[in-house]
Amino acid sequence: MKKYLLSLAVLSLFYTESSACAWSDPDYEYFNLFTQSIIKDKSYLPFLHSYSSRFYSDFKPSQIPDENIDAWKKFFGNQLTYSETDFLVNKMNINDLNALKKGTPTNQLLLKLGSSFYSKYHEAIDYLIEAKYLEPYMKINYVESTDSFYYRENNTDKNATNLDYNKTISALTSLYNAAKNPEIKQRYGYQLVRFNHYTRNYDTALQAFKTYVEPIKLRGASYFMALDQLAGAQRGLDMKSDANWNFFQVFMNSKSRKESAFVSMKLSDTASFNNILKRAGTNNEKNMAYFLLGYEDFNNPIPIMEKMFEINPDSEILKVMAVRSINELERSYLPIYYYSNNDGNSTIENSTIENSTNKNSDQTKTETAAEPKKEELSIWQKIIRFFKNLFSSKKDKNSTEAKADQSDDELLDNPDRIPVFTKNNYWYDDKTKDFLDDLEKFTNKTKEKSKDEYWQIADAYLKFLKKDYKASTEILADIKTTNPEYQEQIKRMKILNDIVSQPKIDAEYEDHLMKDYAEYFVDKPEPKKDSTETNYDYYGEVPSTKDFLKDVLANRYFLQGEDGKSFLMNNTLSDLQYNPNSSLVKSVEDFYRKPNKTQFEQQIIAKNINNVGNIDAFFALIYGDRAMRQADFEKAKSYYAKAQQFSGIPRANYERYNPQTGNYEKLVYDGKIYDGFNNISDLVFGHNVWESYQSSADESMENENYSLFPFIKPNMNKLQLADALIQLKQAGNGKDAKAAQANQLIGNVLYNTSILGYYREIFVMDVDNSNGGKYDFWSTDKKNPYQYYYKNFLDRTYIEPDNFDLTLNYYKKALDLSTDKEQKARILFQMASAEQGKYYQYEAKNPSKVDYSDPKWSEKTDAYQKQLDQIKNQKYRTYFAMLKTQYAQTETAKSLMGSCSYFSYFMK
């Protein structure tokens, strides 16, 4: 199906970028707030809007009644329920029916019907016995092509050719002639048409329809079942136009066979729906033909809908077209993720698109500079237009009301924090806006003509999408309906209008949420799954109204500066481990310690404060780690003293590779491995032998000589480590070789625990140094890379960047105090490595601006790379140059040339 013109450019990127990812599903990338399935005629459910599959499937098969079962239920005088009739016709064993015929039934349902049931309905029971006998064979014989490469799993299944053709035809003909009831008679006619179709006796099938089905003037379920088989035989004879017309008749008149009839029409005639329109005689046929044209080529559906309106404004299929159009608009207006680009510009993206720049590999660096990514941000910038000045106020600045709201206005005007789904903030693609306007005009017109309240509900929802909440609410208030599905949609939309139009969420409003809308926020017990439902859903739950409202509130809290509450609307406390930014952690802690929480805060937000062991220790550890990265060892020690009850980084079910066993093993804190606080090796004071994060510490690291510092233990916890660094700092205040070494060891710790170091996990709450978002370089100067909420918390790097100048300062003290050339060479190499970190930070914040669609992209990118190389050599090679010019003949320098390929290249 063509992606029609009203799709936004961003939306089209969803279906180009994300389609390359096997885990992407476009039906899970937006909020579906207008329930498509509220249409009254459930037989059209497969034709609702979906991008994930050919037909919409988010409904239970039982919602579409089978007209054949309804016909049997009526035939049996409504003695049976629908499910009992279905069991009798489709599931009951043939032996049970034969037992009934003999007068010895054992099946509970048949016993319930009594001994007179067979005598009254003997023709029907005899037919069902014959039908059940034939059913296992009623498949067409598949003829394998010599070019076929598909594996057919059940190629030994029974098919119609396994039956004796002459005997079967003779038996069915005899039963047809003997039957007195015209409905049963027609059913035998259906079996004759079907059997000839499936044995590829197509001409005979056509004749059987004319002889045994058509003369009986009934036009119920059995007639259209037979017509379906006739059309199949006509297709086999290449009578495409006739086959297509008959499939069309089945589509119009059957409830449970619409989907298969639609597929059959497509297979029969490539110009199927246009040809049907030409042949259509009645208004109903024309209306249905227009529907099929609009459904198949969902370009701009309004002109088709206008034609359908002229025929019948109360048509159910017109509502199907409208609800599909509304759903398409939702995909443009209600994305499940809002993001911001690395340069701070706003955008909407698929959650699978990554915007990280990672300069760390698990092997030694050998290149002068990593090649910049093919930059697509400029394309996004061309596509996306967000309004930054939101919630413009018309109040008199000198009024009391304006002064009272001044702080709120300032907050909402903060360009770094952007409201979602508010009156002025959303950008529009002109064609999409035009389509919304046109659909609203059509809906307004139709609601005046149609008696169905659906059009009023649709009109109110379009007002909601246009952010006219007052008008939407007024329309909803005037609707009078007894339809329970309509009532539920109206109720939900009233809540949406109320909450989304609220710019600030305070305690009073939170009380209102719990009093009036608790069902949309309080978690309900998981319902038991129907045995017929799929047990596994790769994508999880489809985004719901509850999820949407949660996102709106998360955004409002974010705008209000209540980051802790915003974070906990979409994340758990333990999620802080993945991006332990100290300012966000402080806001979460403030909420945790807040007295007198509202009921909403207690039940909805605080429930996400999950088990992290000792919470006080959890917070103290994060603050201590941040202080260590700032080289504030005294502050770190004070926090670590409060973190001694830390029970380990809460990484449930985490597995990591064990090179000794060759297996992935579940992480268990056994008192011997690093757990976030304990068991830190003294190698953290050492230096790299080579850069390989996957290798063991003994392979990658080498100890310095720290015999002068007995307080450095082979195994330490963080409190001991902070104390050791304090003592080294004191020793470093001297003027001798011991002071030089003390400063060098401090520099080593700071470098080794930086984003480039082997122990990079120690102060960022991670269990090991394996690659991930924590080890990406920040690509923005903003203190907070989020602009909407923390829903996408794990998709960006939000750990304060390393300050490599702190590392360089300690190394500089060591270099100035040292008189040993070998030590100086080692210190300079470490300084050069830290300086490389500063270059990576520069590069990440200055990505190429060359548009990937530029025909000279390669040429311009190469030129930009040369510019980067020049900047790197001029500004970020200070200590490599000193090492080369002053210490090239040292044993340390020669050894480094053997272990570091880049240094070797530089020295040459």
Image (spheres, rainbow, N blue to C red):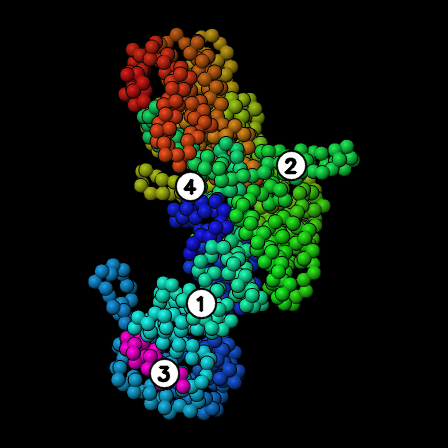
Percent of width and height locating residue 206: 33, 79
Percent of width and height locating residue 864: 39, 26
Q: Comparing marks 4 and 2, which lies closer to the viewer?
A: 2
Query: Does residue 297 show up magenta in the picture?
Result: no
Residue named by callout 1: 277
Residue 37 seen by the camera: no
Query: Does residue 192 show up magenta in the picture?
Result: yes
Q: Is residue 301 left or right of residue 497?
A: left
Crowd class of label 4 (few under 14; some 14 to 19; many from 20; radius 10 Å) = some
Q: Which quarter of the image is occupied by the N terminus?
A: bottom left
Amino acid type of the residue tagged 3 in the rendering: Lys
* Residue displayed at 42% across by 59% down: 54
Residue named by callout 3: 210
CA gap between label 4 and label 1 equals 66 Å
Q: N-terminal of the two: label 3 or label 2?
A: 3
* Residue displayed at 44% across by 60% down: 296
Residue named by callout 2: 412
* Residue displayed at 36% across by 66% down: 269
Amino acid type of the residue tagged 4 in the rendering: Leu
Instruction: Read off the magenta span.
Output: 191-215
Secondary structure of the residue carrying tag 1 is: helix
The disc at residue 292 is none
Q: N-terminal of the two: label 4 or label 2?
A: 2
The disc at residue 667 is 4
Crowd class of label 2 (few under 14; some 14 to 19; many from 20; radius 10 Å) = many
Amino acid type of the residue tagged 1 in the rendering: Leu
Percent of width and height locating residue 463: 63, 52
Q: Nearer the viewer, residue 211 or 583?
A: 211
Amino acid type of the residue tagged 2 in the rendering: Leu
Secondary structure of the residue carrying tag 2 is: helix
